[in-house]
Amino acid sequence: MSVVITVAPTGPIATKRDNPALPTTPEEIAEAVADAYAAGAAVAHIHLRDELERPTADLRIARQVVDLIRDRCPILIQLSTGVGLTVPFEDRERLIELRPAMATLNPCSMSFAGGEFRNPPADVRRLAARMRELGIKPELEIYDTGHLDECLRLRDEGLLEGDLQFSVVMGVRGGMAATPENLMTIIPRLPEGAIWQIIAIGKNNLQLTSIALALGGNARAGMEDTLYLRRGELATSNTQLVARAAALAAGLDLSIADVSAARRQLGLVG
Ligand code: KMH
Ligand code: ZN
């Protein structure tokens, strides 16, 4: 097994005012992804922004970003269906009609930073069913221990198939804090065969990513999760963060998955 590195070049909240290197236009996002691919990323987790840098589920922008990425490199595309706190679920779920290899599935509603992240049970089930129908691998985003139980419920209802893939998201205000103790309450409870990574938001990003790698998890890196390379020093690119994750893996004697290894390990069809 090798380490799958996912690049998350831009998220739903930060703007260029927070870090001028944050990619927000379709071209900038595609360039950031291509550079990250060259640095070792096999998966790209994608959020979209409109011309005012607001998160959007606009299918025209989504198609443009996906095409620009595909023109540049064969990285596996994982569309975020989280999109952004202000975007209605009905718009978010439509993104999977572009048939990415993977897409996120957020199982529960929650407070999220200063806002509300709405994932009502019926909507989550409709999205999970459509993903299953299209053969799109869900990345299950769990922000608290109960979210894991909800995912297991979805599996028991037949809505999730194969080995489950989890992102354990830590450090979001409203979800569990980014601490090793919280990580250790989740990891032993993951179902057999689970594939997982940590998304550690903010200042504990590097430490939690390192612990996850040492425990057999995959790695996620990029400016969705942290705008900083280290305390007080803004990252100058996503590639810098991906290269650091690749170096961490190399330091632990772990090999980095290329796209075909990642495809196999993540159980992607097609
Ligand atoms: N920024 C993540 C913690 C998703 O992509 O589906 C939340 C998120 C979910 O953006
Ligand atoms: Zn995201």
Image (cartoon, grey):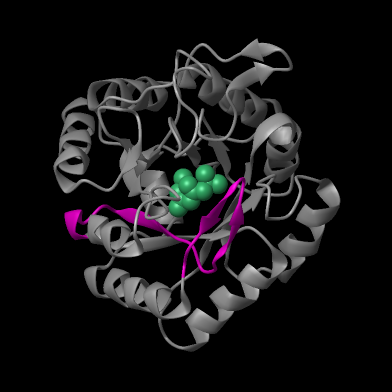
189 is higher (above) or lower (below) than 264: below
Which residue is rendered at x = 24% and y = 75% of the image?
133
Measuring from the top left, give residue 112's x and y in whole percent. Answer: 59, 51
Say left or right for 185 vs 174: right
The total number of labels drawn is 0
Which residue is rendered at x = 62% and y = 46% of the image?
113
Q: Quadrant of the C terminus?
A: bottom left
Measuring from the top left, give residue 259's x and y in whole percent. Answer: 36, 40
Say left or right for 116 vs 38: right
33, 97: nearer the viewer? 97
Measuring from the top left, give residue 95's x and y in whole percent. Answer: 25, 55
Say left or right for 197 vs 270: right
Measuring from the top left, give residue 40's x and y in whole percent. Answer: 45, 28
Find the residue positioned furthest to the right: 181
209, 12: nearer the viewer? 12
Find the residue positioned furthest to the bottom: 157
186 is higher (above) or lower (below) than 98: below
123 is higher (above) or lower (below) than 244: below
250, 206: nearer the viewer? 206
- Residue 36 appears anywhere in the view: yes
20 is higher (above) or lower (below) than 129: above
Which residue is rendered at x = 51% and y = 87% of the image?
156
Instruction: Please report the bounds of the magenta region as a residue range.
Output: 97-119
Which residue is rendered at x = 33% and y = 77% of the image?
126
| Residue 130 is inside the magenta segment | no
Q: Quadrant of residue 143?
A: bottom right
| Residue 104 is inside the magenta segment | yes
264, 167: nearer the viewer? 167
- Residue 252 appears anywhere in the view: no
